[in-house]
Image (tube, grey):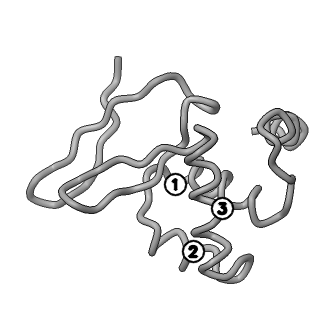
Amino acid sequence: MNPEKLRQLFNHHGISFTRQRREVIYHIGKHGPITMKDLALSLAAVADRATVYRTVNCFTEKGLLTKISYGWKFKIALGEGFTIHQHYATCKTCRRIFELKH
């Protein structure tokens, strides 16, 4: 996503445009659904774990991210502010999450 459009989206939702927050969106956009643990580890050089967790919670409340449940765990994916409404399926054997194409 274009940085200026991302800035406008953040402003629309009353969110400060920080490097850490920007990196959370870019990382999830690039890698798709990811666990909180893997996201925090991937962004360790940019933000500490608490910052990643707070950012994801904030973005989830605003609808910018969505939680995809599989069993009693979940993965984080971009919300409808970035993509059209998506549906996902989870493989019961390997626990991979697949986006269902329309």
Q: Number of callouts in the render? A: 3
Kind of residue at badge 2: Ser
CB of mark 2 within 8 Å of CB of mark 3?
A: no
How far apart are the alpha carbons under marks 2 and 3? 14 Å
Residue at point 64% right, 54% down? 58
Residue 55 is left or right of residue 96, and the answer is right
Residue 31 is left or right of residue 22, and the answer is left
Which residue lies under the disc numbered 3?
55
**In the picture shown, does residue 65 fall above or below 17?**
above
Helix, strand or loop at label 1? It is: helix
Q: Give whichever of discs 2 and 1 has the lower sequence position.
A: 1
Which residue lies under the disc numbered 2?
42
CB of mark 2 within 8 Å of CB of mark 1?
A: yes
Marking on residue 39: none
Which quadrant, please, contains the N terminus? Answer: top right
Helix, strand or loop at label 3? It is: helix
Residue 86 image point, x, y percent: 41, 28
Marking on residue 31: 1
Residue at point 30% right, 36% down? 88
Q: Give whichever of discs 2 and 3 has the lower sequence position.
A: 2
Quarter of the image where one finds residue 55 = bottom right
Quarter of the image where one finds residue 40 = bottom right
Residue 99 is left or right of residue 59, and the answer is left
How far apart are the alpha carbons under marks 3 and 1? 17 Å
Residue at point 68% right, 53% down? 26
User: Crowding near pointer 3: few (<14 within 10 Å), some, many (20+)?
Assistant: some
Residue 11 image point, x, y percent: 86, 39
Helix, strand or loop at label 2? It is: helix
Which quadrant, please, contains the C terminus? Answer: top left
Kind of residue at badge 3: Thr
Q: Give whichever of discs 3 and 1 has the lower sequence position.
A: 1
How far apart are the alpha carbons under marks 2 and 1? 11 Å
